[in-house]
Image (cartoon, rainbow, N blue to C red):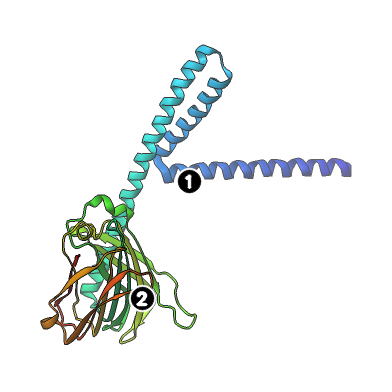
Amino acid sequence: MTFGASIRRTRRKQSKNGQSTMLGSTVEALQSYVLNTGVIGIVEGVLGILACGGILSALLGRPGVRAASTVAVIVAVLGLFVLLVANKLEWRRRTELDRRLLLRYCDRLHERCNFTWRISDWRQVVTIEANGDTHDKITFTAVPTCDTLDFVTFWEGPNWDWPERYRRKTDVHVRSVEVEGEGGTRFDVTSQWLSRGRLKVMVHLSEPALRDSEISLIAEFTFPAKCLPLVQGSPEEFVKKFTPGPEHLEYTVVLPPDCSGYWDGVGLKSGTERYSIQRRTNTSGREEISLVADGVATGARVGMKLDIK
């Protein structure tokens, strides 16, 4: 055997190995796709191929073939749309199940393993837009009352019979408080809708927090139509309830542009050691009403009732 023949044989062998590797990768990718998408994924692929073939036939074929191809394309596209919707609903169902199970077992840990904490400081700013949408920014400090704490839960939501259709447009992010350039990163969050539009949020800490340490977090919510009754002329309560009660509470409501409001206290005389409510105009020219309270009692329902003038 000559040296050139040996090189040609080696190249043919390498080419066959490359083709085999490419074929194996393709088959593996197809297997993974089928396993992840199931029958719906296979049907989607078939309908996609039919749609592409129908489009080419409609463009390049004879008139009779074009008409039939056009019908086939329409049917294939409609089928793809229906399957995409079904696939989306199926993945949403699976995600909701995983979320519900995770929250359930974390609640069990909270009950059985005595995972407890208290809120020492809570500062919330609710900015109301003219259409009733709100942006809520909550800065709070949690203190573990157990040896180690891996997660913190709280809830937020509208104070009226809020329609479920707004849920998909609600957004929440939780991050640590930035101090001298350190912090500000986001945490993993699991959420679940409770009754009356309340959103339960579970914040998974990056590392366990030890007893009596301080966990300072910032939670930001976007709620569509959260304060719709208020902007439509109905009084609305902005109240909080804690167990145990925080040492310090600040609750600020920024009214819609060109609006002014009336206020009354809710549960403040019996539920706090001291409090004050002030009205002022912020740097954006919007009126805001702020409650500051210290020594909030455990289980007390405290806050403000507002009405737009």
Residue beneath the point at 23% across and 52% down: 164
Residue 6 placement: quadrant: top right
Q: Residues within 10 Å of mark 2 (few under 14, many from 20)?
A: many
Compare residues 188 and 237 and report the one nearer the observer.
237
**Amino acid type at image mark 2:** Leu
Q: CA distance from mark 1 to mark 2?
A: 40 Å
Compare residues 74 and 29 and report the one nearer the observer.
74
Residue beneath the point at 44% across and 78% down: 178
Compare residues 63 and 284 and report the one nearer the observer.
284
Residue 127 placement: quadrant: bottom left
Compare residues 144 and 279 and report the one nearer the observer.
279
Residue highlighted by disc 2: 217
The spot of residue 183 in percent (x, y) is: 45, 77
In the image, is residue 231 above or below residue 293? above
In the image, is residue 154 above or below residue 92? below
Residue highlighted by disc 1: 32
Extreme residue in the right direction: 2
**Amino acid type at image mark 1:** Ser
